[in-house]
Amino acid sequence: MWMLKWLGIAILLILLLGFAIQNLEQQVDIVLIFWHFQDVPLIVVILEAFIIGMLVWFIIAFVNEMRLRSQLRGISRDRDELSRELQTLRNLPLEEGEEEKEDSAEYHDNV
């Protein structure tokens, strides 16, 4: 399975390299608020946009993962408390009520 993963990565890198080579001569101008960049290769712009998108995705995914782990810890803590409570209740001695004792005694007398 790991071999297929690395084969897929190699194919994607070859395709990316081919795309970059075909677009080397294409230049673009970029204007960002206060900065102006002239004659930037298109592949650089595309790769930078991809990297920035991946970083934003990583930050969002990381925050979400931490939130979910926190919720899981809380749920696990609640589960442990409920398990201890259940174990305590299971270990309590059974006590019959007065009515149950009388019914039980009458049943044994009749049998």
Image: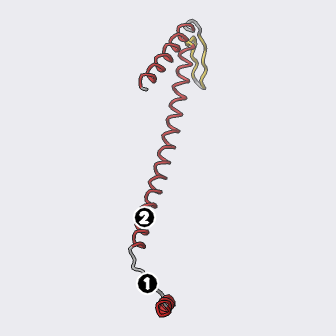
Which three-letter amino acid code belongs to the residue tagged 1? Glu
Q: Which residue is mark 1?
A: 95
Q: Secondary structure at mark 2?
A: helix
Give the position of the N terminus as an image quadrant.
top left
For residue 92, above or below residue 72: below
Which three-letter amino acid code belongs to the residue tagged 2? Ser
**Label 2 Cα neighbours within 10 Å, binned few <14 / some 14-19 / many ≥20:** few
Which tag, 1 or 2, sits closer to the chain's start?
2
**Label 1 Cα neighbours within 10 Å, binned few <14 / some 14-19 / many ≥20:** few
For residue 91, above or below residue 22: below
Nearest to the observer: residue 69 or residue 94: 94
x, y percentage for residue 76? 44, 56
Residue sitting at the far front: 111
Residue for point 46% across, 90% down: 108
For residue 15, above or below residue 107: above
Residue for point 42% across, 73% down: 89
Q: Pointer 1 and pointer 2: residues touching (CB < 8 Å)?
A: no
x, y percentage for residue 22? 56, 7
Q: Quadrant of residue 32?
A: top right
Res. 83 mark: 2
Residue for point 51% across, 39% down: 61
x, y percentage for residue 23? 57, 9
Q: Quadrant of residue 93?
A: bottom left
Q: Secondary structure at mark 1?
A: loop
Res. 74 mark: none
Residue for point 59% across, 10% down: 27
